[in-house]
Image: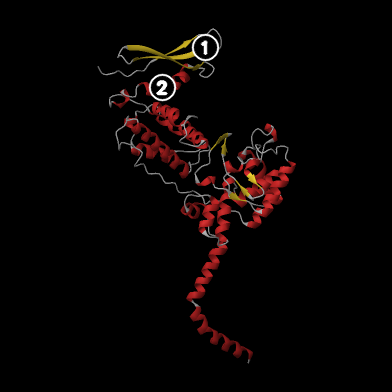
Amino acid sequence: MRQCYQRGCLRRTHRKSGPDCWEFLWRENDLTRKRVRRTIVIGTVTQFPTVDLARSGVNGLRMYINQNSCRRREQAIHVADLVDHYVQTELSDNADWYSPATRVVYQQFLKRWIRPQWADVDIWDIRTMAVEHWLRRLQRADGKPLANATKAKIRNLMSVLFNHAIRYEWLEQGKNPITLVRQSAKRIRIPEVLEPREIQSLLLQLKSCFRLMVILDVTTGLRRSELFALKWGDVDFAGLRLDILRSIYLRHIGNCKTEASHKPVPLEERVAADLWLWKETSPYRQADDWVFASPHNQGKYPFWPDAVLQKVIRPAALRAGINKRIGWHTFRHTFSTLLIANGENVKVVQELMRHASSRCTLEVYSQAQIKAKRQAQQRLVQMILADEADKLAPVIQCNSQVEMD
């Protein structure tokens, strides 16, 4: 007999101690093929104050219970159910497929963009052009169009979501409707890069550890998640290097972005000296303490990167007369661009940036400065017009002699 799809039953039960809890009930066959009732506690009313929230909490569980039934085409599977199942299996704290930062971002994208639009749509009814037109209309909270890069990330996450359905055989192989969705990731504006004199002006406006943050970031190219995740035990003053062992995002501590990110970073002597002076004055100087520990949290967590950027670094940039929009990634772009401008070997720059490929270093993070482009153009012109200049030299000399006579 074909097994029926189990939608189950949700009930609220009273406990002798503690708040009431939500229970989910369903029926299934045991090992002897006997029909039995199962019950599982979903959570307390404190965790799920309303019945709607409790129902959303069992969506992923319902998908587990009906894994075999979900493979039948006549059984509707809503995108909301697929999202809940994906979050529970791939984005939970126990899953190690993604870094903590990626898990947080994916959950935010699912909650902010994908679920509100597609929650009640059957996964079999998603159409390529419908998704493409929806992506074109996406806007930010201020009404401006969403950045192409963000749209591309949403598109890619939807593709991952439907590949998840294919893996569990709820969709047929090759039936991912997002595969042919076109979405450009072209930047709306070119990333800002600071000139050396602008960096110097900015540093004059910063004090204490905030000045050190900028110096360390712009001379090592660390990602902000790596910069704020540094602990004193990661700093090798004798060997003049930083060991990159972890990253932190929204206070979630995890591994670095890629395998190449774990490579140690060299530390220049003067930067190391500034770092040592900060360690001597910091109240948090033990090996397991954060380098940039926040005094507001008694050193339990590092400073909040966005708060430092908004309240300290950007106002300092304005005081220094810098009108560029500065972000933490600006220092990483500046680091790569200045190294290339100095004529450093591309492989060396790639290793310093800890990129898996030099293509990313050159195409995404490095820009040719206008001075370098002008000098290259002048050298080319001299090569092309060298003979012509030699021919004109006697004529110029003769004209000068006539004027003198």
Instruction: Please indicate, yes or no, whether residue 320 appears anywhere in the rendered image.
Output: no
In the picture as drawn, the residue positioned furthest to the right comes out as 281
Amino acid type at mark 1: Asp
Residue 319 screen position, x and y as percent: 69, 49
Query: Residue beneath label 2, please?
Result: 61
Residue 146 screen position, x and y as percent: 48, 41
Residue 197 screen position, x and y as percent: 66, 57
Is 120 left, or right, of 343 in this rendering?
left
Task: Describe the element under mark 2 as helix, strand or loop.
Answer: helix
Circle 1 Cα neighbour tier, 10 Å, few/some/many (<14 / 14–19 / ≥20):
some
Q: Give the numbered dot on residue 20.
A: 1
Residue 367 against residue 402 in the figure, above or below: above
Instruction: Please indicate, yes or no, whether residue 379 appears anywhere in the rendered image.
Output: yes
Q: Give the numbered dot on residue 124.
A: none
Amino acid type at mark 2: Leu
Residue depicted at 53% across the width and 70% down the height: 378
Task: Describe the element under mark 1 as helix, strand or loop.
Answer: loop
Quarter of the image where one finds residue 180 = top left
- Quadrant containing the C terminus is bottom right
- Quadrant containing the N terminus is top left
Front residue of this view, candidates 314 and 90: 90
Residue 375 against residue 110 in the figure, above or below: below
In the picture as drawn, the residue positioned furthest to the front comes out as 238
